[in-house]
Image (cartoon, rainbow, N blue to C red):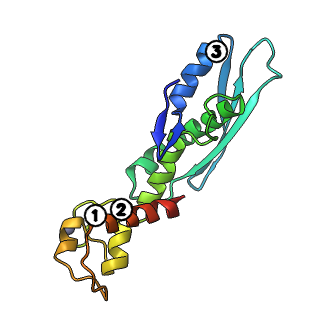
Amino acid sequence: MKSINIKGKEYYEVHQRILEFHKLYKNGCIKTKILSNEDGVVLIKATVIPDMSNPERCFYGHASEWQEDTKSLVNATSHIENCETSAVGRALGMLGIGIDTGFASKDEIDIANRKQTMNSGLQCSKCKKKISFPISKYSKERYGKPLCMKCQKDEKPKGAPTEISKKEDVDNAVEQASKEVK
Ligand SMILES: [Zn+2]
């Protein structure tokens, strides 16, 4: 099964897990059901049955997603699909598919990262260029506002006498921010 390496850990995308499931269990079945869908919060249950001649032996996975930000097109349009993918990924994990390094799938990490991304002001306040979450965090700490790398160079850091935008500083900030994301 093809995996993706994120920060030294191997993860399997849900579609890879599904392919693996169908390869291993020719008589298998994957079902999903929306348990609730209210106020933009959806809860989905996935059921994985490896052998339909023995449906008693089944594995469940649950996931919830919410349309937290109406400005986000992705969440506004596909939180149900994302939720379904997560639930299926977790049910397959219960069966032992793709859990070499834990239950989280690549898709779940993407969702978590996206939520994180949506929650912060990810635009340079000067030139309006899009910036990443760690850069934004670093800049806010250093300059009190989100700035891109280029605009940071023209800005005086608040109360910090040291030369800024050294590569190591940025690397440290990125490292620090990604720790907090988890
Ligand atoms: Zn800028």
Q: Is residue 89 left or right of residue 115?
A: right
Q: Residue at x 49, y 44 (%)?
A: 8
* Quadrant location, ligand no. 1: bottom left
Quadrant in which residue 89 is drawn: top right
CB of mark 1 within 8 Å of CB of mark 2? Answer: yes
Secondary structure found at label 3: helix
Tell me the kind of residue under disc 1.
Lys
Q: Residue beneath label 2, please?
A: 171
Q: Nearer the viewer, mark 3 or mark 2?
A: 2
Helix, strand or loop for disc 1: helix
Res. 171 in view: yes
The type of residue carrying mark 3 is Leu
Q: x, y (%) of residue 148?
A: 24, 66
Indicate which disc residue 2 carries.
none
* Placement of 40 over or under 169, stated as above or below: above
Type of amino acid at the residue the image marks with label 2: Asp
The residue labelled by disc 3 is 24
Position above or below: 91 against 113 = above
Q: Of residues 70 and 174, which is closer to you in this image?
A: 174
Question: In percent of the image, x 58 and y 37: which residue is there?
Answer: 84
Distance CA(mark 3)–CA(mark 2): 43 Å
In this rendering, would 156 be left or right of 172?
A: left
Q: How many C-alpha atoms fall within 10 Å of the one at disc 1: few (<14), some, or many (≥20)?
A: few
Q: Quadrant of the C terminus?
A: bottom right
- Distance between the alpha carbons at the discs numbered 1 and 3: 47 Å
Query: Which badge, 1 or 3, is on the more N-terminal residue?
Result: 3
| Viewer-nearest residue: 82 or 148 | 148
Residue 164 image position (x, y, % from top left): 26, 75
Task: Say what secondary structure mark 2 lies in.
Answer: helix
- Residue 143 lies in what quarter of the image? bottom left
Q: Which mark is residue 167?
A: 1
3D distance between C-alphas at marks 1 and 2: 6 Å
